[in-house]
Amino acid sequence: MKLVIPTIFAKNKKQFDERFKKLLPVSRDLQIDFMDGKFVRSKSVQIKDIPNLKNYKNNFEAHIMVSDPERWISKLKQKGFKKIIFHIETTHRPERLIQEIKKLKIRPVVAINPKTSLDKLPNGVPVLFMGVIPGKEKQAFVPLVYEKIRSFRQENKRTVIQVDGGASPKNIKKLARLGVDAVNSGSYISNSDNPKQALNKLKSLFKE
């Protein structure tokens, strides 16, 4: 099943509240980005400033662009996240972190930046390829990532592949042909006057 997941990228509580309200009725699946100003330059809304997600029927995933992911896991569990995406560049013990996430009955996903070697990825875990350098909105897709996805898919036929950043009507068909299972979309949907229509457009192109 091909999924397009809107992303809530917010630098403060006010921006988060606006985008949360806008995107909540649009999609059952939603991603919330967290940034600490260390792993990436930007800082995001804090965990304490988002509502208790257990009160909603949506499926929420957390994308943590932070330097110490181990310290975030239990707090994200308390908020009601069902999936946690952490960066392979931020931990020396990815397998241990994966097990800690699984113990909390949360699905782990490993994110990888455009210039990071595929050799660093652990086996058998869903992978999120960053299509851009993390931490900023409205970036163009980094072309070398296409080849990385192609190479990874050839060696990993059944691993779930997710892509975050730079997805648009111009390239989402190509991502589908490369074997991508899920795509996150931030500004294309959240900045649209009609986010539902924007989401449906991406969905239709992704499934073709």
Image (cartoon, rainbow, N blue to C red):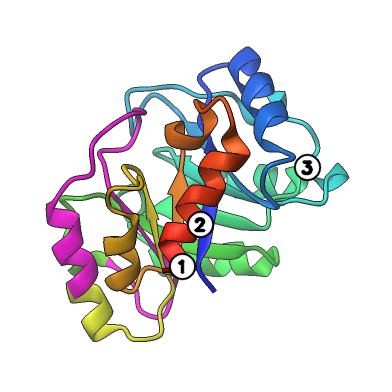
Q: Where is residue 179 in the image (x, y as percent from the top left)?
A: 33, 74
Discs 3/2, front: 2
Rounded to the nearest whole Å, what is the CA distance between mark 3 and mark 1? 29 Å
Marks 2 and 1 in Cβ contact (< 8 Å): yes
Question: Residue drawn at (41%, 80%), measured in percent from left and top?
Answer: 124
Q: Which of 135 and 87 is in front in this view?
A: 135
The amino acid on which the numbered mark 2 sits, given as a three-letter code, is Lys
Question: Residue drawn at (58%, 35%), measured in percent from left and top?
Answer: 195
The region drawn magenta spans 121-150
Rounded to the nearest whole Å, what is the CA distance between mark 2 and mark 1? 6 Å
Q: Which mark is residue 207?
A: 1
Q: Is residue 70 visible?
A: no
Up-down relation of residue 124 to residue 134 (above or below): below
Marks 3 and 2 in Cβ contact (< 8 Å): no
How many residues crowd mark 3 within 10 Å: few (<14), some (14–19), many (20+)? some
Left or right position of 3 against 39: right
Q: Position of residue 129 (x, y in %)?
A: 32, 57
The amino acid on which the numbered mark 1 sits, given as a three-letter code, is Lys
Up-down relation of residue 108 to residue 46 (above or below): below
Residue 87 falls inside the magenta stretch: no
State the residue position of label 3. 53
Q: Position of residue 112 (x, y in %)?
A: 30, 55
Q: Position of residue 53 (x, y in %)?
A: 78, 42
